[in-house]
Amino acid sequence: MRLFVTPAAAPLRGELSPPGDKSISHRALIFSGLAEGQSRIEGLLESGDTNATRRAMEQLGARFERAGDALLATGIGSDGLQAPDGVLDMGNSGTAMRLLAGVLAGQPFTSVLSGDASLNSRPMGRIIRPLEQMGARIEAETGGRAPLRIQGSDALHGIDYESPVASAQVKSCVLLAGLFARGRSSVSEPRLSRDHTERMLPHFGVTLESGPALDGGQALRGAPVTVPADPSSAAFLAAAALLVPGSDVLLHGVGLNPTRDAFFRVVRAMGGRLDILDRRESGGEPVGDLRVRHSPDLVGVDVPGEWIPAMIDEVPILLALAARAHGVTRIREAEELRVKESDRIAVMARGLSAMGVDLTEYPDGIDVTGGDSSHAVVASSHDHRCAMSFAVLGLVSEGGVTIEGAEYIDTSYPGFRADLAGLGAELRTEGS
Ligand code: S3P
């Protein structure tokens, strides 16, 4: 699908709730599916990625049904998982594959996890290593890529795992496998990655100690879940409001977990008019409403390396902002971006250069010098966040932008076009 974005002819105005948090939605589906009893999930994201997790949990025996705006989950119970009747298709979702691999490693049956071309080219060695240390056997393609054939075991043993990367997917994978293992499992990581698993497991009745660490053999009990709006999706709308002259937008109920909020901190350091109103707690997560206004005097910043894990998914949209800020924005210590849904440093560098943006690529980051930008045809490269970042920059680029492969936006934000159009932007699509 091609997406044509026209330069904004009017300010973006209005208020809306961005879609449910993708990370929290995956966990809500997996934990409620593993729990004994029922769970009511409010605010769940329904998108390509979370649908993959839901379908996989159904293949393992969980049931989900609509109840008005909520989803009602009937869990299988930790020892009730059934062997899937075919390959578990994880689509484009790294979170689905890595978290479910942890669950499946602890089952007394074999399962196969596969995905699309993007997912099957991403590194899985980072989860294969700890799961094999715990006693699972996993066959992968060359270089530790999916499809993964997981020969699970009901005799896994707990480990103290020192993860070489700050990755919530690795951490959650080991903790989930640890639930099915004998003894205790713990994970340490070089920098704290998002902590949604640690926050949500206790809500389902699991005793978790700091580390994080847990004892195997604990059962999950069904629990109500409220999913906040996704800060990673809100970031695109916020950036659009910062860039388009005269804009004033209010975003309701956005997740502000400190392991996720660094993009908003950087925006403020750049001089962005972003106010956080009514900070509160919802479903065990801090949330707030964001008022974002046009900010003509954004300045480039050096992003602190220690902030990167808390904004790893927002770097592409930050680069779009940097392209219009005064001076240079420098990102380093962000080599993880090269193994996301695409090599995000390379894909953003290619697309932004085509749009006339001045930049220098580094192995672990990029420097972007702000200035003018103009129309180009750019490729999503199977990457929803790159596609949406180009779309936002297109709103203020001469002649707009054309994005090839825009269907990938649906992996995390199927309502993106409608939400931007509701605020006053003009977007048009062609093909499917
Ligand atoms: C996620 C963790 C992050 C993030 C991804 C979602 C999660 O990946 O980029 O979009 O839900 O755990 P890593 O854990 O690989 O950093």
Image (spheres, grey):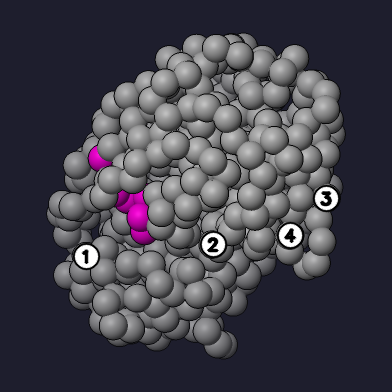
Which badge, 3 or 1, is on the more N-terminal residue? Answer: 1
> Badge 2: how crowded within 10 Å, few (<14), some, or many (20+)?
many
Q: Position of residue 280 (x, y in %)?
A: 57, 17
Amino acid type at image mark 3 = Arg
Depth check: 121 or 169 in front?
121
Circle 2 sits in a helix, a strand or a loop, which is it? loop
Whole-angstrom CA distance, mark 3 to mark 4, is 8 Å
Whole-angstrom CA distance, mark 2 to mark 3, is 19 Å
Q: Nearer the viewer, mark 2 or mark 1?
A: 2
Which badge, 4 or 1, is on the more N-terminal residue? Answer: 4
Whole-angstrom CA distance, mark 2 to mark 1, is 30 Å
In the rendered image, which quarter is residue 210 located in?
top left
Q: What are the residue bounds of the magenta stretch?
A: 333-340
The residue where tag 2 is placed is 381
Whole-angstrom CA distance, mark 2 to mark 4, is 12 Å
Residue 2 disc label: 4
The residue where tag 3 is placed is 428
Circle 1 sits in a helix, a strand or a loop, which is it? helix
Q: Is residue 285 visible?
A: no
Q: Position of residue 248 (x, y in %)?
A: 73, 16
Q: Residue at x 76, y 50 (%)?
A: 4
